[in-house]
Image: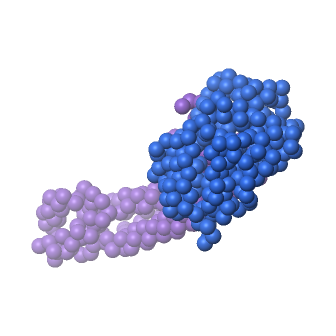
Amino acid sequence: MKESAKRIFQSGWINFKRNSYLSMGTTGVMVLVLLLFSGLMAVNYLSSQVVSSLQGKVDVSVYFKNEATEADILMVKKDLEDLSEVKLVEYISKDQALGDFKEKHAGDALVQESLAELDYNPLQASLNVKAQTSSQYASVVGFLEANKFRSIVDKINFYENEEVIKKIERIYNGVQNWGFIATMALALVAVLVTFNTIRLTIYNQKQEIEIMRLVGGSNWHIKAPYLVEGGLYGALAASIAAVVFYPALIFVSPKAETLMPGVGLISYFVSNMFQFLGMLFFIGILLGVASSFIAIRKFLRV
Amino acid sequence: MIELKDVSTIYDNSIALDGVDLQVKQGEFVSLVGPSGAGKSTLLRLLTRELIPNKGEVTLDGVNLAELSLNDLPYLRRKIGMVFQDFKLLSSKNAFENVAFALEVCGVSKEEAAEDVPKVLAIVGLSDKIKNFPHQMSGGEKQRLAIARALIHRPKIILADEPTGNLDPVNSYDVVKLLMKINELGTTVILATHDREIVNAVGKRVISMENGKIVRDQVVNGKYVI
């Protein structure tokens, strides 16, 4: 068994070495597929980070009319807190809102002077509501719209944020879908190229295969070296893709961080290196072996 | 041991074998003669199950070859040694490697091959050519090397398809003598040829074929008659 496996791997390796130019071309196409796949993973990670950070910033602010009493507002707060969709409700009184506003615009003399001119607090009391997930805001808003205290509510500012989130999600989904289609298209090209390489190897070794057949070589002994050859294309391609991808991350990561502060592209791929490399090798080898398998089925008669 | 019952084979509307009935016993030496296209090679290809008959049944040791699964096919072929007119040797391998290759593809270890191959090469008289490549050998030596490869699995049957077709009379006779020696050791030999001198010299069972049919079967001391 050990002897057989050794022979199969040796034959696969010899096939791989013998067709050096063809092997380079096949591996090159596979490298492109794997790089595209890796790039897609990076884009996926970036967009998911952006979406989740935006989703974290989203809340529903309920502004109350000036005549609303604190007791009424606290009643609404209590009602909201009883909802299972609601994670947190924060009450901001008129005074606190003014204090926050002043503090925020402490350096702006014009704002400070304008506020001083007014003899009343123009800001409204509000409730900031955070839902468990972003998809639950609509039902929270629905609850507020139907609430018995609806008459003291001046406005609910969820709708603008909702549009932004939806837009980002659309972009995110678009990138994912088109990236997936591009990866699949290139993967198909890689399968075709590998398939043809194995086909040529089979053709070149026609006599050897015929002799193997006639002397009673087992099907496995005849076919397996070509599967190994395909797998080697995939493994080499995965190695090259990894060698190209990680240094490219060093170059791209600071730029991504400038655009999206706090998003550590390189740290993500370093901390998940084993999973990522495992996946890269798995996909590469799978592509190679599957292409060989198709070529063997079609062209190798035993 | 080998039995063909009403076997017919058709290639692209032309009949290669037409209702052939044949029985070959263990240890027989059979010369299969006839002009090109008579159906000799087709008959041999049926025995290695490279072909399945369109009609009839080919059995070996009671097993219908058409019913053999793909997984069992290698085991059938290990029982049969094949020798061809064009030798079918691998030019990139030397004499030892050409024979050892037949063992390796069947999963035999290198140590076992290193023990068996020199013995078989000695039987065919190629002990001194063990490291020679096919291009460094004469036609007769190449054919003897091909016979060594056919013998390596200790087959029950040797099928030789025009083995002397590319050889001069002296080498042809040497190869046939070798096949007869193998036959004396108990291996069934089926020799397909159209070499009259060789067949007459062998003087064993001769089956004559024409247009896909067996037209004559001389069981004892047969001669080449068409």
**Residue B10 seen anywhere in this rendered image of the structure:** yes
- The spot of residue A255 in percent (x, y) is 61, 55
A44 or A178: nearer the eye? A178
Please name the residue shown 50% across and 62% down the image.
Answer: B55
A166 or A18: nearer the eye? A18
Please name the residue shown 80% across and 29% down the image.
Answer: B126
Residue B96 drawn above or below residue A149: above
Chain coloured purple: A
Is residue A55 rendered to the left or right of residue A244? Answer: left
Q: Quadrant of residue A252?
A: bottom right
A119 or A220: nearer the eye? A220
Q: Quadrant of residue B9?
A: bottom right
A248 or A153: nearer the eye? A248
Residue A61 drawn above or below residue A249: below
Please name the residue shown 36% across and 71% down the image.
Answer: A162
Q: Split into 4 quadrants, where in the image is the N terminus of chain A?
A: top right
